[in-house]
Image (cartoon, grey):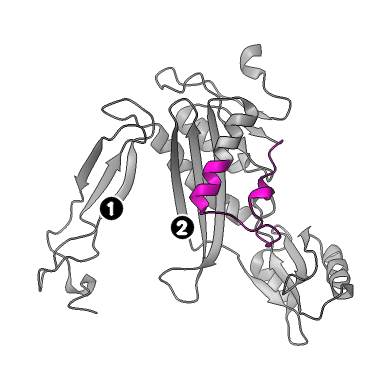
Amino acid sequence: MSKREARHDDNSRSFWSAPSRSHPYRDCIPALATMHKKERAIAPPFKRFLSLPVITCDAIDTDALGTFTGEIARRGSMKDVAGQKARLACRISGRRLGIGSEGSFGPHPYIPFAAVDHELVAFHDRELGTTICESVLSLRTNFLHLDLNQSSDLDDFLERIGFPEHAVVVGRADGSAPWIKGVQTRRDLDIAIRRSAEQDGGSTIRVSTDMRAHVNPTRMCIIRAAATRLAQRIKVLCPICAAPGFGIIDWKRDVPCSACGAPTERIAAKVLACARCSYRQVEPIRRAPLADPKYCSACNP
C-alpha cells in the first residue's frame, strides 16, 4: 500500500484493498457515516465487488438524526435519513463518495404477528449529484421487548433474543426515564432494572433488545445483505451514459389472470434505470404467460 492510499482523515479508519482499474470509481475512497461500527457489514461487500476501500467518519453524530429508543425522532423516511448521512459523509470527509445506512423495525406488512428488520444503505456521488439506495426486508430479527411484572420470565426472554451477544436497553415503558443502553451482562442488567425502578414515574419497567448495529449481530447481517445489493448495483454501468448504479427501480405487476383476464399482482417485468440520466429499460420475467386465479383480486378477493 502506498502512503497516498494509506493516508486518511484523522476522524476516519481505513479498510483498504486495491481498486479495480476498469471502474469509474477506481481511484475513489467512499466515506461511511456511522457511530455503531457498521463498517463491519458495509466495507466487505465494497471490497469484494468493487475492490474499493471504505473509511468511517467518526465525527458525524448519526444519533442526532434519530434514535431507536425515541429520545430523538427520525425526521423523514429511511431513504431521506440514509441519504442525508451519505451526504454528510461526503462533506465531513471531503470525499466524492459517501455512504449512509438506516434501519427500521416493526410488524411485517403482510404477515400477521411477524416482526421485520428493514435495512437501507444509500450511496451518494457528490460530483454526479446522484444517490443510489438498496434495501432488504427480513424476518430475521430479534426485535422484542418484555414489560416486567410478577409473571414475567426474564430468563426466557434473554434466551430468545440471544443475550448477552445481543445487548438490551432498560427503561420505563412510557419513556418517562432515560434508557440505559448497551447492557450485556446479567449483573449490569440487574443494576439497570434497579436504577430504572428508582426513577420517578409509575409505568412498567421495560427490557428491550438494543437495536444499534454494533451490539446486535443479527441486524448487522441484514445490513451486510443490503450493502451487498448496493455494491453489486454500483458495479453495473449505465449503457447510455456509463454512470455507475444501473439497476432495478420498480416491478411491473400485471400478469393476466388465466380465468378472467384481469391484471394480477404477479410480476411481469422488472424496470431498470440509471441514477444519472433518463434511460430506462424493461425486462420481462420469464414465466407462464397467465397467472393462477389465486393471485387475482377479482377471482380471489
Query: Circle 2 — which element?
Result: strand
Between residues 5 and 120, which one lies in front from this camera angle? 120
Q: Which residues are magenta?
A: 59-84
Give the labeled residue for mark 2. 137
Q: Circle 1: is it few (<14), some (14-19), or many (20+) Cα within 10 Å?
A: some
Q: Is residue 43 visible?
A: no
Name the residue furthest bottom.
150
The residue shown at (68%, 49%) is 64
Query: Circle 1 — which element?
Result: strand
Q: Position of residue 234 (x, y in %)?
A: 41, 34
| Quadrant of the frame with the C terminus | bottom left
Is residue 75 found inside the magenta-colored segment of the image?
Answer: yes
Q: Is residue 6 left or right of residue 26?
A: right
Height in image: 4 above or below 291? Answer: above
The residue shown at (40%, 70%) is 110
Q: Position of residue 42 (x, y in %)?
A: 56, 40
Q: Position of residue 247 (x, y in %)?
A: 33, 40
* Quadrant in the rendering for residue 186: bottom right
Q: In the rendered structure, which amino acid carries the disc numbered 2?
A: Leu
Mark 2 or mark 1: which is in front?
A: 1
Q: Earlier in the sequence, mark 2 or mark 1?
A: 2
Between residues 217 and 234, which one lies in front from this camera angle? 234
Give the labeled residue for mark 1. 251
Height in image: 174 above or below 251? Answer: below
The residue shown at (66%, 12%) is 3
Q: Position of residue 128 (x, y in %)?
A: 43, 27
Q: CA distance from mark 2 to mark 1?
A: 16 Å
Q: In the rendered structure, which amino acid carries the disc numbered 1?
A: Trp
